[in-house]
Image (cartoon, rainbow, N blue to C red):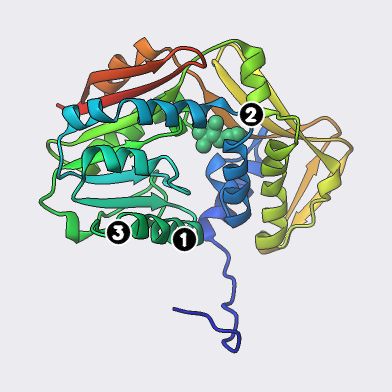
Amino acid sequence: MLLTEDAPLPVRTVDPAFRRDIVEGLSRMPKATPPIWFYDRRGSELFEEITDLPEYYPTRTETALLEQHGPDFAQAVGSGRAVVEFGAGSARKTPRLLRAINPAAYVPIDISGEFLHASSAELASAFPGLPVLPVVGDFNGVLDLPAAISGLPRLGFFPGSTIGNMEPEAAVDLLRAMHRLLGDGAMLLIGMDRIKDSNRLIAAYDDAKGVTAAFNLNLIARINRELGGDFPLDAFEHVARFNPDARSVEMHLRATRDVTAHIAASKLTVSLKAGETIWTESSHKYRADEMPAIADDAGFVCSHQWLENEWGFAESLLVAR
Ligand code: AVI
């Protein structure tokens, strides 16, 4: 539907899954919310800004790996596959892969519909002969792939180390679900950030310009906007810390004073003591040599790995067993 200036504005409905996750997450101790809810339109824009920050090395490091190893991907993957990208976002890295492997179709999946449609249109105009078939949805849930790619062999593409935003067991479950969705003969190209010096890690999640802080705080702004919340934004600060036992960077929103707020959409009152946090994200870091076992647990064989050793990133190709 094309909205013109005279057309009525669409009524914003509450996403029941967002409301459920926020109510559950803010009712438990410690308070914790799933990171997928960062990505409304504003959150997706802020995430794009993060990927350009000097401190946030994963995007540029993976982009360089994709650029450098195009011919290797082409050889390992072959042409004529349908590329299914999980969490496509702006899909800025994707052209490098598509140019290298000459696919038969491209299916970007993302939870932020507005953002997905804009990036899909851009990609379709850069690759005029390529069918681009966007799917709006949460790749952690149940999804159907477009009928237009039935019969085509698939290459899943899961870049950006998004796998790190899952707890390790959930990450294996997700890879298993991707295996099921992609079907027999599928391959999966997956990007993974590697464990490294904690100062580098913390800088990447607490940049000098404050973009990551704004990204984190946007979750509270989103609760206020979409669920009728009255959380005072100035009572929260962004915290990024490294948890050496979990080998993950944790992001939290810390109350700087006692807060009592309400969520009108579910008649919930939320109280936080000064210093208490809402745990909003974990970003797990792995060693590259852990991937073969993770792949094996999910029904794949890790057939190739391409490593960048200066900043520490791994691109792995998994083949369905
Ligand atoms: C999307 N994901 C892999 C990012 C990460 O590095 O964990 C999200 C992010 N959070 C803060 N900065 C970037």
For residue 105, above or below residue 240? below
Q: Quadrant of residue 214?
A: top right
In the figure, is residue 157 to the left or right of 9? left
Q: How many other residues sit within 10 Å of disc 2, few (<14), some (14-19) or many (≥20)? A: few
Q: Which label sits in the foreground, 3 or 2?
A: 2
Residue at mark 3 to residue at mark 2: CA–CA distance: 33 Å
Locate residue 64 relative to residue 129 in the image: left or right.
right
Label 1 sits on residue? 118
| Disc with the residue nearer the chain's start (3 vs 2) | 2
Q: Please tell me whether mark 1 or mark 3 is closer to you in this view.
A: 1
Q: Nearer the viewer, residue 170 or 116?
A: 116
Say which quarter of the image contains residue 28.
Answer: top right
Q: Quick one: SS at disc 1?
A: helix
Toward the right, the furthest residue is 257
- Disc number lying in front (2 or 1): 2
Q: Where residue 102 sits in the image (x, y, percent)?
A: 21, 44
* Rendered image: mark on residue 182: none
For marks 1 and 3 on the same chain, the one whose residue lies earlier in the sequence: 1
- Residue that carries the numbered disc 3 in the rendered image: 133
Number of residues whose C-alpha sits closer than 10 Å to that of mark 3, classed few (under 14), some (14–19) or many (20 or more): some
Q: Residue at x 28, y 22 (%)?
A: 295
- Spot occupied by residue 25 in the image (x, y as percentages of width and height): 62, 42
